[in-house]
Structure formats: C-alpha cells, structure tokens
C-alpha cells in the first residue's frame, strides 16, 4: 500500500501548493486477475477497504461517490477548482522513442506489419490489408501502421507521407485511413495532426 499512500501524499501536497486544501483523496489497489490470492498481513478491515479485484472497483467508486455526495464532503465549487487546477497542468506526454533508443528516422522501414506472422509487407485489398507472406487479412493493420508513423516519425502527416510510409498507391485509400484514425486537418497546409 505504500505506493498508493505515497501518490495520495504527493497529490495532497500538489493541491496544497495551489491553495486547495480539505479535498479528500482516496485510492484503491486493484488486482486484474481474479485468480490472484490476496494474503493479508495486518489490519484486514483497513486493507480490505483499499485492496480488491479490478471488477469491484466501479461499485466501490459508486459507493464512495454516494458517501461523498450524501455527507457533503466536497462541494461543487471545490470540485471545480480541483478540476481546473488539474486541467491547467495537463500536457501531452511527448516521448521521443527514436532519440531514447538512438534510432535514426531513415532506419525505420516503411510498410505495414502483419498481425499474424509479423511480416513487414501487406497489400490493401477492398479496405483490408492482406499479408504477402501468410495471406492473413486485417481490417486495422493499416491504422496500426499509421499509429506507428505518428509514434515514431512525426505527430503530423500528409497524404503523400502516408502513402510512402504505408506503401500505398492510391491517395484516396490513404485519405480514408487517415480519416479513420481520427486525426484532424490543418486545412491551410493539408497536414493531418493528432489531437
């Protein structure tokens, strides 16, 4: 439980540094596998309030929320103040994988990976990818390829760059894949960007 308590402490300190006090902070520790056996050493009641299986968490959150609302532990103004403080500090996590692992952009091979045999090389047929090696079909292999591009190469992409990286000949196919990925366009420059 030390990690949960530590995070609770740091969040409390963070809120206090923004002049937000008396905001209750709760945490849960969840095990994803229901087959996990939990052996408790210590106060079973205290530990039982925070440790459970992941399936129990939604119900615990609903009960906690009811208790907070019923006992007026947090008023709406304070809750909104916390939300605004968190939103002000939120920023995208931008991690340069290539720099971290000392990989050059020109070392990244273009193409789409087969999800069955992991071969690099698929052809686009009737809106699906078909592996050159094993013949497996995939509806989302090209979307995953586009996600790889955004993760590894650039947060923005043009139709031409999409065709080159995914090894497509048809600009309409590339446009369909880009639109399916929920990227948004900077119309003035015809560049698609991640939101």
Image (cartoon, rainbow, N blue to C red):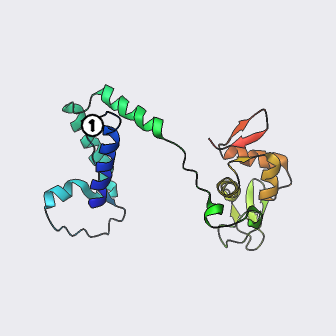
Residue extending farthest right:
169
Identify whether 80 is placed above or below 111.
above
Left or right: where does residue 79 sit relative to residue 92?
Answer: left
Image quarter of the C terminus: top right
- Quadrant location, the N terminus: bottom left
Choose between 123 and 96: the one closer to the eye.
96
- Residue bearing the label numbered 1: 23
- In the rendering, at what x and y percent does residue 194 appear? 65, 44
> Where 159 falls versus 122 (above or below)?
above
Above or below, comparing residue 143 to residue 18 in the picture: below
Label 1: state its secondary structure. loop
- Give me the residue at 30% from left, 44% from top: 12
Q: What x and y, as percent, mark residue 146?
A: 70, 54
Q: Could you tell me which residue is drawn at 31 percent across and 34 percent down?
A: 20
Q: Seen in the image, is 93 located left or right of residue 140?
A: left
* Residue found 32% across the figure and 58% down from its top: 30
Give x and y (percent) for residue 149: 70, 56
Q: Residues within 10 Å of mark 1 (few under 14, many from 20)?
A: some
Image spot of residue 103 (x, y percent): 69, 66
């Amino acid at each position: 439980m030390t990690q949960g308590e530590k995070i609770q402490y740091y969040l409390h300190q963070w809120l206090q540094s923004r002049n937000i006090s008396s905001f209750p902070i709760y945490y849960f520790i969840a095990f994803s596998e229901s087959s996990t056996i939990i052996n408790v050493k210590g106060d079973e009641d205290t530990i039982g309030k925070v440790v459970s299986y992941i399936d129990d968490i939604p119900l615990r959150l609903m009960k906690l929320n009811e208790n907070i609302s019923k006992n007026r532990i947090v008023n709406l103004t304070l809750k909104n103040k916390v939300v605004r403080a968190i939103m002000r500090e939120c920023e995208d996590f931008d991690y340069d994988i290539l720099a971290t692992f000392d990989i050059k952009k020109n070392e990244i091979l273009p193409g789409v990976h087969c999800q069955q045999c992991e071969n690099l090389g698929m052809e686009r047929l009737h809106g699906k990818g078909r592996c050159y090696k094993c013949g497996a079909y995939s509806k989302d292999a090209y979307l995953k390829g586009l996600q790889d591009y955004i993760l590894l190469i650039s947060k923005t992409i043009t139709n031409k760059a999409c065709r080159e990286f995914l090894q497509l000949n048809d600009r309409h196919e590339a446009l369909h894949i880009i639109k399916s990925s929920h990227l948004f366009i900077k119309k003035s420059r015809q560049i698609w960007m991640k939101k």
